[in-house]
Amino acid sequence: MLSFTHVHHAPSRPGAPTLLLLHGTGGSEHDLLPLAEELMPGAGVLSPRGKVLERGMPRFFRRLAEGVFDLDDLRQRTAELADFVAQASGRYHFDPTRVVAVGFSNGANIAGSLLLLAPGVLGGAVLFRAMVPIVPDPLPTIPRTPVLISNGRVDPLVPVAETERLAALLRSAGAEVTLEWHQAGHQLVPDDVAKARAWMQTFSS
Ligand code: MLT
């Protein structure tokens, strides 16, 4: 039994990567399926549902307040998600070195945490409306791992300086960070999808 309720679709295009879809607070394993199809048609999909419930809303880790994370819980949930991806690759026979996260909000934050606490699990990541999840000491090395941060300039939850701090943190760990700003708040806009779709070409084989 895999440890998360999830959806898995095998790729319909041979050699395509597997997109690890990580929804936002209150979302489900179904939320990002249409987005994945827009970003990379034919890719494999692994989409777990976050196990933490905040007033009934699924999330991937606990928070103490908005933007204030329970770091012990985050560490534990990140390790659990890393194990899930490894187990799922055995069960569904996808290449564990070709997993690209696509996360929104809380999902982007646990994707960032996977990059920083479980280096090697992700071959890349698209982080929509992401924050700094944790600052590990020492920093891991994730050399040349492609990461797209797609954030809004007028996001009430994620100040501009927070986004810049995240980009700097991932770059100092060695990631190849592309930062796309949008004239947007916390919700995605069509330009997020267009830019991310173009960026995803990095992973087309
Ligand atoms: C988080 O808790 O991860 C962030 O505040 C984003 C959110 O889920 O609202």
Image (cartoon, rainbow, N blue to C red):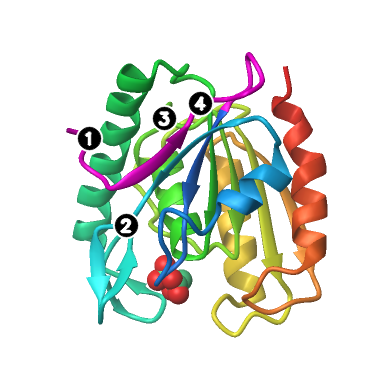
* Residue 86 position in % (x across, y down): 32, 25
* Residue 43 on the magenta segment: no
Distance from the alpha carbon under mark 2 to that under mark 3: 18 Å
For residue 200, above or below residue 130? above
- Overall secondary structure of the magenta section: loop
Q: Are marks 3 and 1 in contact (CB under 8 Å)?
A: no
Residue in front for this viewpoint, 10 or 139: 10
Magenta-tinted stretch: 1-17
Asked whether residue 139 appears in the rendered view, the answer is no
Distance from the alpha carbon under mark 3 to that under mark 1: 17 Å
Q: Which residue in the protein does label 3 denote?
A: 121
Amino acid type for the residue under numbered disc 4: Ala
Distance from the alpha carbon under mark 1 to that under mark 2: 13 Å
Asked whether residue 123 appears in the rendered view, the answer is yes
Amino acid type for the residue under numbered disc 1: Leu
- Disc 2 crowd, CA 10 A, few/some/many (<14, 14-19, 20+): many
**Nearer the viewer's eye, disc 1 or disc 2?**
1
* Residue 176 position in % (x across, y down): 67, 36
**Nearer the viewer's eye, disc 2 or disc 3?**
2
Q: Which residue in the protein does label 4 denote?
A: 10
Q: Secondary structure at mark 3?
A: loop
Q: Which residue in the protein does label 2 denote?
A: 50
**Nearer the viewer's eye, disc 1 or disc 4?**
4
Residue in front for this viewpoint, 72 or 20: 20
* Residue at position x 42%, y 53% in the image: 29
Which comes before the other along the chain, label 1 or label 2? 1
For residue 199, above or below residue 189? above
